[in-house]
């Protein structure tokens, strides 16, 4: 399986919440004004995944100061406008369904979420790599990474914050696994590209600093390996006023004294 075959699995309508919100219809970016009611409604429904949201809850979120009747008319108008964008690609169905006062995304008719595909592909990729199916595993992993344009968008409520952190951890772990894979295959330069991406998001991740130090040794860049340790110390001190783990210190001493195993 190559990257192209993985991409063909994407549905005709995609809602992307990783990074900046995007609505892609038939491969084309559809204009949704940033901060608009349309964006907020779609984000709410997307974060709910396949669970339906009660009409009254949406009205309270979108128009908390409005008269309920006026808010209801606005919601009807908004969903109608949004559904017109996707009807041609969903066999007459709309992007949003509403039945008996409940609203949800029409995932049964071809609406996809980048967060779902990211999770599925990164899990499949890691599993395939662990099973020794390297070509397929790398393809899935790389396509998962291609979907991660940034941390989950949305407001600052606790549920969204927890979901944002969960997805972020999955992204960082995927970068770590790919870095480790390439290091084990003596591809230090390739491993470092993933390590640098990981540390850009989490500069205090010591396992990544240690692997970077080992990669620089593999590239005969001992001085850079020692500098990496200093960067690790600075990041930990600045963020947590903490010292490196014993394993990090031990590796540094081994490199400094030319006694790396």
Image (cartoon, rainbow, N blue to C red):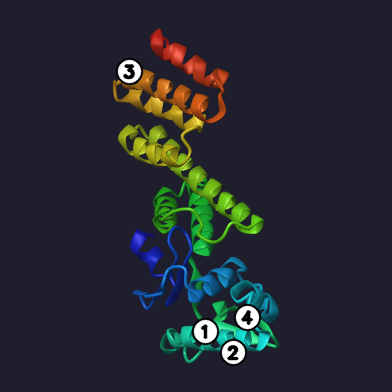
Pointer 2 residue:
73
Label 2 and label 4: CA atoms lie apart by 11 Å
Is residue 238 found left or right of 30 in the rendered image?
A: right
Depth check, front residue: 191 or 82: 82
**Secondary structure of residue under mark 4:** loop
Q: Are the residues at dot 2 and dot 4 in contact (C-beta closer than 8 Å)?
A: no
- In the rendered image, residue 212, in percent from the top left (x then y), is placed at 40, 29
- Quadrant in the picture for residue 26: bottom left
Residue located beneath label 1 in the image: 78
What distance separates the C-alpha of mark 2 from that of mark 3? 67 Å
Image coordinates of residue 52 in percent, x first then y, are 66, 76
Outermost residue on the top side: it is 257
Q: Secondary structure at mark 3?
A: helix
Label 3: how many residues lie within 10 Å, few (<14), some (14-19) or many (20+)?
A: some
Q: Quadrant of the N terminus?
A: bottom left
| One can see residue 178 in this view | yes
Mark sitting on residue 222: 3
Picture disc at residue 66 = 4
> How crowded is the residue under tag 4: few (<14 C-alpha within 10 Å), some, or many (20+)?
few
Q: Secondary structure at mark 1?
A: helix
Q: Are marks 2 and 1 in contact (CB under 8 Å)?
A: no
Q: Name the N-terminal-most of marks 3 and 4.
A: 4
Near-viewer residue (184 or 101) = 101
Q: CA distance from mark 2 to mark 1?
A: 9 Å
């Amino acid at each position: 399986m190559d990257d192209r075959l993985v991409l063909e699995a994407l549905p005709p309508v995609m809602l992307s919440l990783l990074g900046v919100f995007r609505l892609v219809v038939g491969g084309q970016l559809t204009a949704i004004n940033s901060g608009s009611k349309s964006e907020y409604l779609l984000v709410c429904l997307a974060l709910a995944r396949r669970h339906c949201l009660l009409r009254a809850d949406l009205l309270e979120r979108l128009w908390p100061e409005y008269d309920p009747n006026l808010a209801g008319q606005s919601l009807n108008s908004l969903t109608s406008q949004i559904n017109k964008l996707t009807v041609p690609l969903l066999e007459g169905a709309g992007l949003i369904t509403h039945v008996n006062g409940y609203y949800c995304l029409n995932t049964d008719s071809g609406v996809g979420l980048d967060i779902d595909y990211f999770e599925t592909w990164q899990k499949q990729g890691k599993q395939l790599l662990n099973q020794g199916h390297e070509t397929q595993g790398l393809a899935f992993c790389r396509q998962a990474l291609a979907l991660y344009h940034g941390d989950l968008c949305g407001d600052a409520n606790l549920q969204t914050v927890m979901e944002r952190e969960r997805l972020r951890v999955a992204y960082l772990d995927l970068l770590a696994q790919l870095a480790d894979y390439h290091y084990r295959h003596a591809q230090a330069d390739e491993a470092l590209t993933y390590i640098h991406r990981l540390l850009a998001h989490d500069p205090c991740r010591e396992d990544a600093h240690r692997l970077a130090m080992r990669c620089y040794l593999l590239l005969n860049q001992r001085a850079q390996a020692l500098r990496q340790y200093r960067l690790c110390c600075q990041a930990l001190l600045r963020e947590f006023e903490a010292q490196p783990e014993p394993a990090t210190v031990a590796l540094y001493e081994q490199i400094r004294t030319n006694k790396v195993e």
